[in-house]
């Protein structure tokens, strides 16, 4: 029975790998959207938006920014994640930054 569980687990991992690898390969070889802003510029914009929302940035670790295409792949949006220094529930938030317009959206942690 234990051998069968291991076999099923490996088959599942192999199937997921086949589904994921071609997508990652495609994304790496042909980027869907190209960023106009640098990561540093985006973090600066996100820091300003967070400060305007009343956030004390000293209470959070250095933010992490990731570029994400929208469903139409015409607009690139940066997702900037802030994780709080104190490990408490909801002590995190995101700021979304549209690459072309620099428009921001603040998303509080819950």
Image: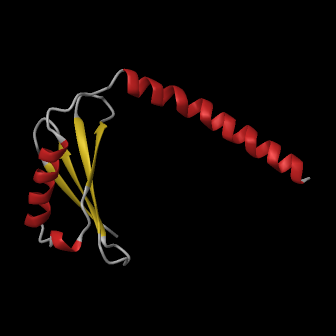
Vertical position of residue 62 compared to residue 55: above or below: above
- State the quadrant of the C terminus: bottom left
- Residue 106 placement, left or right of 2: left
Vertical position of residue 40 compared to residue 33: above or below: below
Query: From this viewpoint, which residue is outermost toward the right?
Result: 1
Identify the residue shown where x is 31% and y is 26%. Answer: 32
Quarter-wise, where is residue 74 in the image?
Answer: top left
Identify the residue shown where x is 11% and y is 71%. Answer: 54
In x, y percent, where is residue 33?
26, 28
Identify the residue shown where x is 16% and y is 51%. Answer: 43
- Residue 73 placement, left or right of 55: right
In x, y percent, where is residue 78?
24, 44
In x, y percent, where is residue 65?
26, 49
- Residue 66 placement, left or right of 26: left
The one of 74 and 92 positioned closer to us in this rendering: 92
Identify the residue shown where x is 16% and y is 38%. Answer: 99
In x, y percent, where is residue 60?
24, 69
Q: How many marks?
A: 0
Vertical position of residue 45 compared to residue 100: above or below: below
Q: How is the image coloured?
A: secondary structure
């Amino acid at each position: 029975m234990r051998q069968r569980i291991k076999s099923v687990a490996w088959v599942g991992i192999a199937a997921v790998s086949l589904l994921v690898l071609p997508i990652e390969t495609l994304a790496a070889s042909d980027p869907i959207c190209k960023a106009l802003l640098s990561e540093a510029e985006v973090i600066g914009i996100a820091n300003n938006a967070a400060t305007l929302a009343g956030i004390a940035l000293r209470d959070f670790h250095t933010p992490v920014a990731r570029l994400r295409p929208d469903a139409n792949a015409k607009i690139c949006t940066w997702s900037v994640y802030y994780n709080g220094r104190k490990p408490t529930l909801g002590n995190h938030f995101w700021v979304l930054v549209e690459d072309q317009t620099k428009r921001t959206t603040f998303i509080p942690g819950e």
